[in-house]
Image: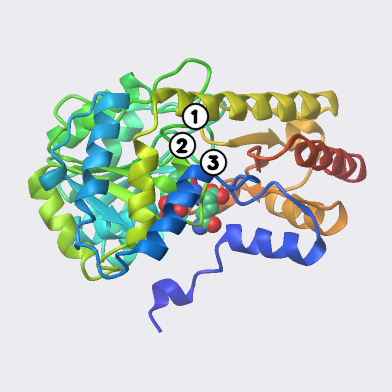
Amino acid sequence: MNPIYASLPDTIFDVMSGLARETGAINLGQGFPEWDGPGDIREFAAKAIIEGPNQYPPMRGTPALREAVAEHYGRLQGVNLDWKTEVTITSGATEALAAALLAVLQPGDEVVLFEPMYDSYLPMLRRAGATARFVRLEPPEWRIDPAMLAAAFNERTRAIVLNTPLNPSASLIGREDLALIAAQCVKHDCIAISDEVWEHCVFDGAAHMSMLQAPGMRDRTIKIGSAGKMFSMTGWKVGFACASPRLTDAFAKAHQFLTFTTPPHLQAAVAFGLAKPREHFDEMRTSLVRARDRMTLALKQEGFHVLPAAGTYFAAIDLHASGIAMTDAEFAIRAVKECGVATIPFSAFYANPPATSLARLCFAKSDATLDRGVECLAKARRLMA
Ligand code: PMP
Ligand code: GLN
């Protein structure tokens, strides 16, 4: 077997959701909303299944969806894209990340990654024959240290993978830090693979800024989005990759032999959803902020130290600062088995985990679930403090 995969555990998200199902625990672990996404988008998809077409859509995606992606980003982010040459539809952001890494990398290349990082980046870039250089971000600000960033680049560096808003730290990479990354990419002639799946989950008046908009990056960025995140339907697996025509051509060559295409009805329904007015996305943000604030307040009242959450639908508790002298991984296992609540340990987001004491909690849940989850966490704190 290929040693890169053979040495990997099952993803932490599947492990924790599996334990939550087995034990009947409240699942604040894997990131998915407790509600089922807008009814009109789901009805659109259902109708499209009955009415068809049900055959292969074009390899790069249906014209309707590619146009809708370009229109959406133009209207809501001020990013101008030519839908014919700069947009590819994928089966989720996960496929887009894999296609981008396969399209850009050759054996011997180096890739800069920020830690903490989403779990698919490292195995996929290793499978493409590349090696990683890490730049560690530290709580509570999670800002980029310019000297550490510069030290990670050299003549072998081919690409950088970034994620803003950043899962699991719930922080944003701001304009200044994007410019730092851009300067290194321009200096070393590198491509940025910019995972922006959380772009609509940005709170407290902040605006999402795409890597495509950073100085000098328009032709060296692959911006990746996810309809699953935008519309609270994580099972849908419809992703978008937006990049200059040259990068899009290379990207599409990798995509055509991963999945080739994505179900046509889901593409049709996502095109319908992307045309929704700005207010639709504002409402989603408002309800997520309400949930974040409810959970944060309740956790603080129970004596937890909660880190700020500027984006995504996650917030972290610091176990040590909350009086729990345990690693995040030990806590995650005991909390789900003994106290009925699933969390995600931050250590899963590092190649060489530091002694993190952070547990990630998903707040895209009903009030009742959040309240019960916090009660279970409070029980865990009493038991383990
Ligand atoms: N990147 C990040 C940072 C994510 O959090 C996720 C899923 N939550 C993905 C990629 C994968 O997205 P998709 O489900 O569209 O494949
Ligand atoms: N991205 C989701 C999270 O961070 C999980 C995705 C998955 O399970 N692969 O929780």
**Amino acid type at mark 2:** Leu
Q: In which quadrant of the rendered image does the C terminus lie?
A: top right
Which circle's residue, 2 or 1, is located before the other in the chain?
A: 2
* Label 3 C-beta lies within 8 Å of the nearest ligand 2 atom: yes
Which quadrant holds residue 287? Answer: top right
Q: Position of residue 137 (x, y in %)?
A: 46, 34
Q: Secondary structure at mark 1?
A: loop
| Callout 2–callout 3 Cβ contact below 8 Å | yes
How many residues crowd mark 2 within 10 Å: few (<14), some (14–19), many (20+)?
A: many
Q: Which residue is mark 2?
A: 166
* Label 2 C-beta lies within 8 Å of the nearest ligand 1 atom: yes
- Seen at 9% across and 46% down, the residue is 245
Which quadrant holds residue 14? Answer: bottom right
**Amino acid type at mark 1:** Ser
**Structural distance between the alpha carbons of marks 2 and 1:** 5 Å
| Callout 2–callout 1 Cβ contact below 8 Å | yes
- Seen at 10% across and 46% down, the residue is 85
- Tell whether 45 sits left or right of 330: left
